[in-house]
Amino acid sequence: MKKINFTLFLFLIILATGCSSLDNALSSVLPSKSNAVPLELQEQMATRVNPEQELFALGSAEVETSGAIIAQAKANKNAKDLLKGKIKKEVAIHFNSFMLNMDSYSKGLASPVLPDLTEYASELILKNASQKGAWENNKKVYSLFVVERDDVAVQSKNVFSTFLEDISGRLLNTKDKLSEGE
């Protein structure tokens, strides 16, 4: 009898664990209904964005008692925040590719400042973002912002190069000061 109870208990634990992890797996793959973008809007976005040449983000906000203008401002901010996250990922990829060409000493100098450089480059790039669409649908406002992928690459290279020039200049100044003391 104890074996049957133990087996039944073990089976129920496995069943409960399996079902909860299945639910988590499904919810992470399937889009949630509250954040779903209407099909008509997806079609309009597809005509305005070239994903191969542009990074884009769609922000949204509920139209509340403060009105559509405030909702549009919130949707714009939401889109820019989402876009900044995508920009940061792209900038990090560029910076990591630049780091591949560096020796270990230089990597040691550059690695600690990469988060700051990434943030700085992302802010610069985000200033060049342009709005490619704004829609209102069912008490919700949507805003589409884009940046050129080429701009991400160019700005990433410029920021990284400027950092390297700055650190090189500082090291040379230190060397010159040491030489003067001799």
Image (cartoon, helix red, strand yellow):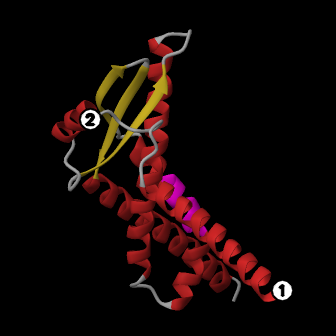
Marks 1 and 2 sit apart, C-alpha to C-alpha, by 57 Å
Q: Amino acid at mark 2?
A: Leu
157 on left or right of 17: left
Query: Mark 1 = which residue?
Result: 2
Residue occupying the point 79% across, 80% down: 5
Label annotation for residue 39: 2
Q: In front: 177, or 35?
A: 35
Please say whether residue 117 is visible from this viewpoint: no
> Residue at horizontal 16%, vertical 38%?
47
Residue 174 in magenta stretch = no
Whether residues under marks 1 and 2 lie with C-beta atoms below 8 angstroms apart, the answer is no
x then y, percent, for residue 51: 23, 52
Say which quadrant the N terminus sits in: bottom right
Residue 11 as seen in the image, left or right of residue 33: right
Left or right for 107, reference 140: right
114 inside magenta stretch: yes
Q: Position of residue 59 (x, y in %)?
A: 42, 35
Q: As displayed, is residue 27 above or below residue 83?
A: below
- Give the structural element (helix, strand or loop) at label 2: helix
How many numbered callouts? 2
Toward the front, the furthest residue is 1
Looking at the picture, tell me which residue is in the foreground, 166 or 106. 106
Q: Position of residue 6 (x, y in %)?
A: 78, 83
How packed mark 1 is, by other alpha carbons closer than 10 Å (few <14, some 14-19, many 20 or more), is few
Q: Amino acid at mark 1?
A: Lys
- Position of the C terminus, as image quadrant, is bottom right
Residue 127 appears left or right of 131: right
Residue occupying the point 31% across, 58% down: 154
Q: Which label's residue is closer to the chain start, 1 or 2?
A: 1
Q: Residue furthest right?
A: 2
Q: Which residues are magenta?
A: 113-120
